[in-house]
Image (cartoon, helix red, strand yellow):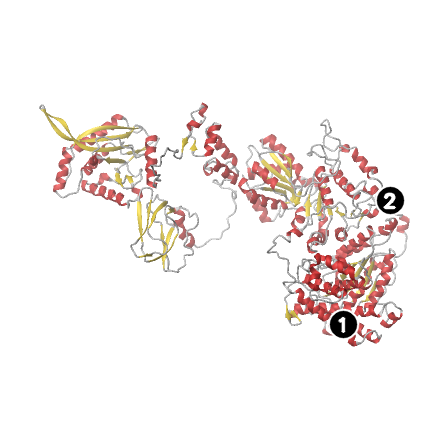
Amino acid sequence: MATVVIMPKQGQSVESCILTELKKKKGDKVAIGDLLFAYETDKASFEEEAKVAGEVLEVFYNEGDEIPVLVNVLVIGEPGESIEGLRPEAGASASVEAVDEKPQEASAPQKETIIPQPQVAYSSTASAVSPRARALADKHAINAASLKGSGPGGRVIADDVEAAVNALPRTTPLAKAMIKEGGLHAPAAGDGLAGMVRSSGLSATVSQPTMTDGDSTVKPLTNMRKLIARSMHASLQNSAQLTHHLGADARRIMELRKVAKANGLNVTINDLVCFAVVRALKQYPQVNAHFEGDSMRLFNHVHLGLAVDTDRGLMVPVVRDADLLSIEGLATRLKEVAEACKSGSISPDLLSPVAASFTVSNLGNYGVEMFTPVINLPQVAILGVNTIVPRPKDLGGGVYAFVPYMGLSLTYDHRALDGGEATRFLKQIAIEIENLNVEL
Amino acid sequence: MPKAQFIDPVKVRAKGEVTFSPIPVNVYSKSVKEELDLKHFTQEDLVRIYRDMVVIREFETMLHAVKTTGGYNGIEYNNPGPAHLSAGQEAAAVGMAYTLTLDDYIFGSHRSHGEILAKGLRSIEQLSDAELDKIMNEFWNGATVHVVKKNFSGSTKELAIRFLLYGALAEIFARETGFNKGLGGSMHTFFTPFGIYPNNAIVGGSGSIAVGAALYKKVNRKKGLVIANLGDASMACGPVWEGLTFAAMDQFTQLWEGDMKGGLPFVLNIMNNQYGMGGQTCGETMGYEVAARIGAGVNPQQMHAERVDGYNPLAVIDAYRRKKELIEKGEGPVLLDVLTYRYSGHSPSDASSYRTKEEMELWEANDCITTFGKELIEAGIAKQDDLDIIWKEIKEAMFDTFKLAIDDELSPRMDLNKNPELLGTMIFSNESIDSFSDATPDVNHPMEENPRVKQIAGKVRFVTDKEGKPVSKMKQYQLRDGIFEALIDRFYKDASLVAYGEENRDWGGAFAVYRGLTEALPYHRLFNSPIAEASIVGTAIGYAMCGGRVVPEIMYCDFLGRCGDEVFNQLPKWQAMSGNLLKMPIVLRVSVGSKYGAQHSQDWTSLVAHIPGLKVVFPVTPYDAKGLMNAALQGSDPVVFFESQRIYEIGEMFHEGGVPEGYYEIPFGEPDVKRAGKDITILTIGATLYRALDAAKELEEKYGMSAEIIDARSLVPFNYEPVLESLKKTGRIVIASDASTRGSFLNDLARNITELGFDYLDAPPVVVGSRNWITPAYELEDAFFPQPSWIIDAIHEKIVPLKGHVPTSNFTDAEQIRRAKAGI
């Protein structure tokens, strides 16, 4: 019997994946364990192995297709077997819930045959949209279903869409024409008289043509690159970020690192810094938090995000409940998630910016002496860890010596934190680093 | 009610009695030899009578074999269509046809193969070779004769006989080379060049149609008589009786003047085979004992009725010779009860379980062909060998014909795969014809001297005068004036045009549309008919079949039920069933009532719109009424022309400049925007237009909603494009008329608009029709017919809630479901 291979569901929030590479095509023989195809979610890449042997009877998608999870991707079976009925429905919905419910629906016996009595209007529901309203909404790029309907039974009618269109900022004829031509969109409010949107206020949604002498190639962005671009840009646009720099005496953690090494423990400087950060966060709950516009979400535990550089780009996996871990436990978990990122097997749930309560980005290994990391919104701050440099220090009694110092750069969202708080928190990290006391 | 006829109470109340003359029964008693001696026939005539009977017998024997054994002479053929055979009735058919000339027409029933062949053979005998060649070569451009000509080397007359057999048989087998392109079939086939007019699959269907053909001959001064060959059982049908009363109207002899004075040239020929299906008319299903008795109930002449022995061709010929003379003297109509017997059942599926073997054997022992053959031999006219040769030759011709007619290459069927719309192009003839007659129209005075014409000349042709002031009712050019102008114009253009109905003449029609026509037209062009709708429509159909234009009137729409068969089965179908040989230039005026309750106030436009083959219009403004009536009268198709009694007096309020004095036509099928608007479209049929206008006014004033109103004007055909154009603008539509909602044509409009304009719709098209009740008394009508408030309520409930509106009628979904569940 033919076996279907579905697009796996990687994580609760994933609705669809991109098929990045087909490793087997129609007609290929496969053995158990052979790689069938590679795919990626917003942030991670995966590979699907064959769980049965046979021949690939049909592949329903091409490389680059976005495929809803749990939908059939290909079929393995004996040559000549029918694949009828296995083909995914046209426009198969990415609705995870609907797919999950299907078997239940099929098996649920019809127990009651009570004919419902009409109590309310049949023809219209709260979300109903008239065909005309739908067409009008499409024309003006308005989500008709989100409007409050004024038709019978709450049906969204053309009037409602027109009202929504009228509520948009007034636009000059030139700007209107440019929007219609495509490629430009209007801001929520214009910069002209009485909020009028002018052509100069339009922003581009596609790249402007560039001068080219042929010495360039256009490389489309990967899904992940697009996502990073969007979130980083949004972070800088939507928050009030600034960075404080401060140094910490690194002698203590360098000593600890030596001890660990001597004891055969794989605990890095970064692990120790992170451990210190966790301790500082426990004392500054307002930093171990998310800023949600009109409220702050404070976390009971520390979910520590760690920026990891991978071939596919920047990834920030999270170690949940980091405050409950020993130094060894933390070190192990940090390595696990970093490796998972590099191999592409990380769960997308661990990559979500909302999964972490605070993030550490360590560029010390690369010799970076100072930088301004970008906050992973809605987190309120991010710590940049710099390289260790020797710095003169007054050891007392007129004695000066070069001491290794570690640079710390804290970027915080001024909407959530004030300079004093941020400085005190940053100082606390330095104190923890300088006085770290752990069993190794 | 002509003033010329004085009803004197003294006379009509005086004592007396109605007397009857004896009705002759089987009075003919001559032998073949006696007839020969009297030189009533030549020897050749008598042999031909024998031959013609043999042709019919073999034709029916062949079809019987095909139906019951699946083939003929060993060649298999399946004929799924009907075959109502008349073996046994040959003497009656040949006798009926013998005295007829090409000027005489016959109409038939479902069992008329014999009559067609008899009349065809008789016509072939009377026509010269040159005339026959012309007829055959011109018919379907020679397509039919081309098939029989192949490998045939006999004389023109012999060829013509094969042409007749083949044309009829190919028609029965639904071949395109048949007499009616295979669209009529066994029960409808005909061939007018031989004076053979349509048979009719509806029992008694020809009863009124043939009378209309006789009316055509009389009014248009054409020679000849018209025979309706009907079965004895059809004497029970109302429309047959209605046809008889129409045919026997006193006015033909008492009121029609000059050369028009005299009875209709009509013969009701009862082919009395004594059974109707399995019912025995004499003794079981009828009470007349002898069918000829019916004549005594029709007029003082008793329709010159007599029973004739239809088993003896010479007895039938004798009767026709005498009756023809009466008709030529203007003493028609005539009724003949031609007694005969059918050997086969009603149809091949009938096992004749209702009659005994002995009875059938006894009639077969007295077989009309065998008996007549014996008499020919006894009279020394023919030897048995001669008769055997006739049989042999006929059988050969029949076998040849059979083989040709079942050959799919020589006799193809209409190719509806290759030409999927071919039948569609035959439903209407769509011609534009000024006049169906070359004659000068009979009129009483020049049109400008007509009192009504003069009166209208003084009227204002718009609702307001030049100063914009409303015109008084007396000075107002009304809707009825628009219809009148179109009609009188055509009466002066087309000599064939006649109009009749219940109360059409002196009174000027119940609704004064015809006032003034009485003065303009002699009786034979405008007259009162019996109160018999089946005869009014049925005779009009026969009149049109013969080539005349006619305007019958149904006084109240509700009376359409009284002419259901004529309107639903006859009027719409004959153009296509004839293979487009016939045209049907009939404008059936139907007045939709008001104020008169459940049986006088119904809008039944939907019923006729449902039947393919009828054009249906319902103008409600004087401009539209005149223009659409002109178009209807210029055409060649049946038009059901609805008028509303609510608005006969209404003036023109839309057409700029008023109703034109000259001739103009409004094309069928074009809805008209009567009021421009932008927020909602209201499409109306009929007088509901004016209620929609009231609704539009209120919508504008109270809710700031601007309604565009479109008057459908036509139901069939209908152009959706202007409605869709309006819908693109408004996105919303209400469709309204006075017809009861369930099954109304409004739903058809709504369905098509939904499909064609779905993407423009802001709400489903909403139908506002009358309730599914009886029409109540006038004082209660507001609860039944759509009111302006209903239209507003429906908009509020189903399309867009109107701010501050409090509905008074219930257009909720729940109520809609409740009503449907209750069937009301």
A388 displayed left or right of A81: left
Instruction: Look at mark 1 in the image and give the residue it sits on.
Output: B390
Residue at the (44%, 28%) spot, across then down: A199
Could you tell me residue B678's position as x and y percent? Answer: 58, 34
Quarter of the image where one finds residue B207: bottom right
Residue at the (14%, 39%) spot, across then down: A439
Give the mark nearer the N terminus: 1 vs 2. 2
Could you tell me residue A48's position as x and y percent? Answer: 31, 50
Q: Which mark identifies residue B56?
A: none
Quarter of the image where one finds residue B165: bottom right
Chain of residue at mark 2: B
**Label 1: few (<14), some or many (≥20) within 10 Å?**
some
Could you tell me residue B92's position as x and y percent? Answer: 79, 66
Instruction: Look at mark 2 in the image and give the residue it sits on.
Output: B3
The amino acid type found where label 1 is placed reads: Ile
The vertical placement of B661 against B717, above or below, is above
The vertical placement of A195 against B808, above or below, is above
Closer mark to the observer between disc 1 and disc 2: 1
* Residue B285 seen by the camera: no
Same subunit, tags 1 and 2: yes
B247 displayed left or right of A370: right
